[in-house]
Image: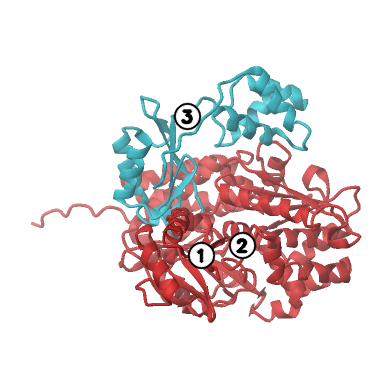
Amino acid sequence: MTAVYEPCYDSWEETRGAEIIAEHAGQEGATLVILHALQEAFGYVPEAAIPMVAQALNLSRAEVHGVFTFYHDFRHKPAGRHVLKLCRAEACQAAGGDALAARAEAKLGVSLGNTTADDRVTLEPIYCLGLCATAPSAMLDGRLIGRLDEKRIDALVAEARR
Amino acid sequence: MNMKIFIPRDAAAVAVGADDIAVAFEQVAAKRGLPVEIIRTGSRGLCWLEPMIEVATPKGRAAFGPVGTEDVNSVLEAMASNGPHALRLGIADEIPWLKRQTRLTFARCGVIDPRSLDDYRAHGGYKGLERAVSLGPDAILNEVTASGLRGRGGAGFPTGIKWKTVAQAKADRKFIVCNADEGDSGTFADRMIMEGDPFLVIEGMTTSGITVGATKGYIYIRSEYPHAVEAMKAAISAARRGGYLGDKIGGSTYSFDMEVRVGAGAYVCGEETSLLESLEGRRGLVRAKPPLPAHHGLFGKPTVINNVLSFAAIPFILTEGAKAYADFGMGRSRGTMPIQLAGNIRQGGLFETAFGVTLGELVDDIGGGTFTGRPVRAVQVGGPLGAYFPRALFDTPFDYEAFAARDGLIGHGGIVVFDDSVDMRKQARFAMEFCAVESCGKCTPCRIGSTRGVETIEKIIRGERVTENLALVEDLCNTMKFGSLCALGGFTPYPVLSALKHFREDFAPAPTTLQAAE
């Protein structure tokens, strides 16, 4: 029943980037808010946007770059067409997550943290989706999946490769 | 009359198909011409029974679960005819697992529609705030202090004292910050309450604002919780429309407003000073204390920063009075703790109960052991920085001091169960690796110590000079424990040292091949 969902992003345009930055720059402590908004629009934070954020917030380019690189969420280049995140924290480890992660890696031919050569799937670890009583769990493009087993992980991998 | 059907929208239920079930119920009911009203609720916390669907009956809500899409036809039939069904669980409130809990904070979770302010009010919501407004700041402080509430984020600092410090601070602006960066594996109580009863958190923060004289609040939610972000944003808008946020809340003289901020995947931002840095738009570098956030917090202003569950406990304390809360619990741990049973456990979920229940009761009796059916070997209590306890310590009561006395911590109340296939060397290595990846980098014991810890444990795993390297790991752990700036480096030794102490057999040197005797 679940429809295949494909994230859709704009390609980088300076004017669009400037609009997004201006929209949020008035908030207190706006750096993360702006970086999130940029990534939501473009699928990543283009390098060209960093000095623009710095200028808008009266920060140095290094400061904004520092923030951008500190947080795991922000990407410096687009992810694959689909992003499959596997929870690798303790509760999912206890529930058999190690073997399922290895299975997904083998099926996709990439290790966690990498994108397949055809740019279709980015496979990433995530440290806790808070679904620890229905573990192991995963997230495919924002959709949550719990009680993973071999069959379900195979189905997820197949869906992500489409 | 419409048949009222309750389907959770909690992320844990959605992850096992609740959205699909909701659509299927609508379709099947339409096809059969059955008038139904579907209400999306939070989760009751019986996670192994999710998706757990309920239907209103004259005797109370009857529950069914776990329901798959293939069951929808027959479940709907059983609901309409009040007939038998293999998935029928009886009246939800009478399910023993739920009935034996003491739900003070989670009383409404899974019952009400989290998007509806009216539903919240119809179930006793905002009564605490009404009383708070009539009491005024000093009397609220007395109530919160007398309740014995301690910070539910893990540190267990008395909430009343924290609030009093901020109330007494002089400043042009003060802030209320809710720490919803619930990064510990095995914990999901913050997520559940934000998704299932978000107005409760808003009410708690608003009360805090009135008490200390703050008019602005932030709730910092981790990005891994998109459903909670959505639920809190919707509730904040509804509260504003209903006059419960903004100027002169609920017709009083007090003003308070708040907004959601979303984290970006850094575990260390659950540490309060790192969280404040992040809220200010910087790298989540831990600040040295003092100064305390209560004096010098967000944007340098006096700030109350509390965990979601601490704020969520406040409305009950004000509605029912401090004594009603303090009557539960043991020793210096008063009230109830929403305990989360997770990992390899047969009956996992949220179990709110008074402090004092033993670890063994929680794991074996309430949790029903492992779902793999193998014996429980280890449990990690309190997230990635919590100790691993063996069965021999299952008589430990759930209480801040009792766990500390056995070199453990209750943290945020998460219990992750492992069966006998666990390799404790791997878990010890993981604890160090996690710290190495998530360290903010500010202090050396955490930044460098964790990396050296990974390397040394790897040597032990390879069988290199095991005895010497074990001694080295213990020494390193002590350096991290006493030399780190915050709990990340300071508590990473807990899982490592507890693994070494209680599961030493896993670290023994590989048996050397016996030489043939002459």
C-alpha gap between disc 1 and disc 2? 19 Å
Q: Which chain is the one coloured cyan?
A: A
* Residue B431 position in % (x across, y down): 47, 50
Residue kind at label 2, given as amino acid type = Asp
* Residue A78 position in % (x across, y down): 50, 26
Question: Which disc number belongs to residue B113?
Answer: 2
Q: Which residue is mark 3?
A: A79
**Front residue of this view, candidates B319 and B282:** B319
Q: Which chain is the one coloured red?
A: B
C-alpha gap between disc 2 and disc 3? 36 Å
Q: Residue at x 54, y 75 (%)?
A: B397
Q: Which residue is mark 1?
A: B35
* Residue A20 position in % (x across, y down): 68, 28
Placement of B50 over or under A54, stated as above or below: below
Going by the image, does A43 lie left or right of B172?
Answer: left
**Front residue of this view, candidates B503 and B79:** B79
Q: Residue at x 51, y 25 (%)?
A: A77
